Amino acid sequence: MALVLQPISEIPLIQPGDDLAAIIKQAIHFNKISVKDGDIFVITQKIVSKAENRYKSLHQISPSERALKIAASSGKDPRLVELILSESNEIIRVEHGVIIVEHRLGFICANAGIDHSNLLHEKDEPDLVLLLPLNPSASATQIRTSLERTFHRQLGILIIDSHGRAWRNGVVGAAIGCSGVPTLSDQRGWIDLFGNELKITKVAIADELAAAASLMMGQSAEGFPVIHVTGFPYPLKDMPFEDLLRSKERDLFR
């Protein structure tokens, strides 16, 4: 079966308190999508954060001494730095224009994933920013449960964000939370085309799917925050998102 990814149109601008599952269901019906067992819905974190009201206004933030010091070396707004600190377990590196952190959710990213793009800035809120969801996997489970109840199918939900990568230029889609979607395919012990046994191969299949979906979502004004996936070549099952994260002790690049 071929892997098919389809952008879902007619997703409106999301407001705090919106029922994402209900909005996605309505869009599924509008797009006349036939939902099958094993289908996955890939959702950008931005609409999850908006629905969960993860907005912050910088004018309400008072920077600490540590934030002021980091702001001086990074060139960033001290109030934004304070938010980055509040969302991070550890500061990994600071350079002009960027702060690399271990996010409180465990992954390494720039600026704690805090964003100000694709936000409708009101005149009295010019310094509005958006934080990542508090618990993306829990959010994914809520949406999955609601969709499965409606469509009577086994489904998966993947919540993704755009991340930079060590040693590479540009951002790609990466999973930050999931429900019902396998994260890793451990292929150690499999045999290759020439009869050789794979010794170390683990494939980050959730991230591979996230990157494919992100290609269709786009990064600016495309307006496709949800992607329907059918034909995913792995059986759906619950796996902890944390399986994708390399421990600090095994991180050779930190």
Image (cartoon, rainbow, N blue to C red):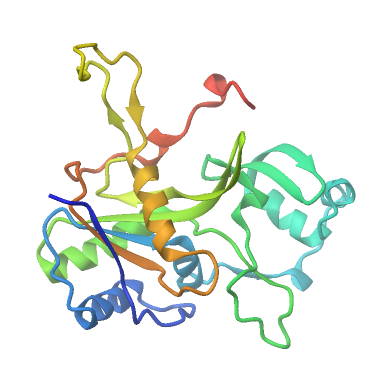
Q: Position of residue 1 (x, y in %)?
A: 12, 49
Seen at 52% across and 54% down, the residue is 162
Seen at 47% across and 64% down, the residue is 218
Relative placement, left or right, of 234 versus 66 is left
Seen at 30% across and 74% down, the residue is 24
Relative depth, front residue between 217 and 63: 217
Q: Position of residue 146 (x, y in %)?
A: 23, 67
Relative placement, left or right, of 21 versus 47 is left
Residue 220 location, quadrant: bottom right
Quadrant into which the C terminus falls: top right
Q: Position of residue 29 (x, y in %)?
A: 19, 80
Name of the residue lying farthest toward the front = 194
Residue 199 location, quadrant: top left
Name of the residue lying farthest toward the bottom = 123
Seen at 46% across and 61% down, the residue is 45
The number of numbered discs placed on residues in the rendered structure image is 0
Q: Position of residue 5 (x, y in %)?
A: 28, 60
In the image, residue 183 sits, relative to residue 82, either above or below, namely above
In the image, residue 68 sits, relative to residue 120, either above or below, namely above
Relative depth, front residue between 58 and 93: 93
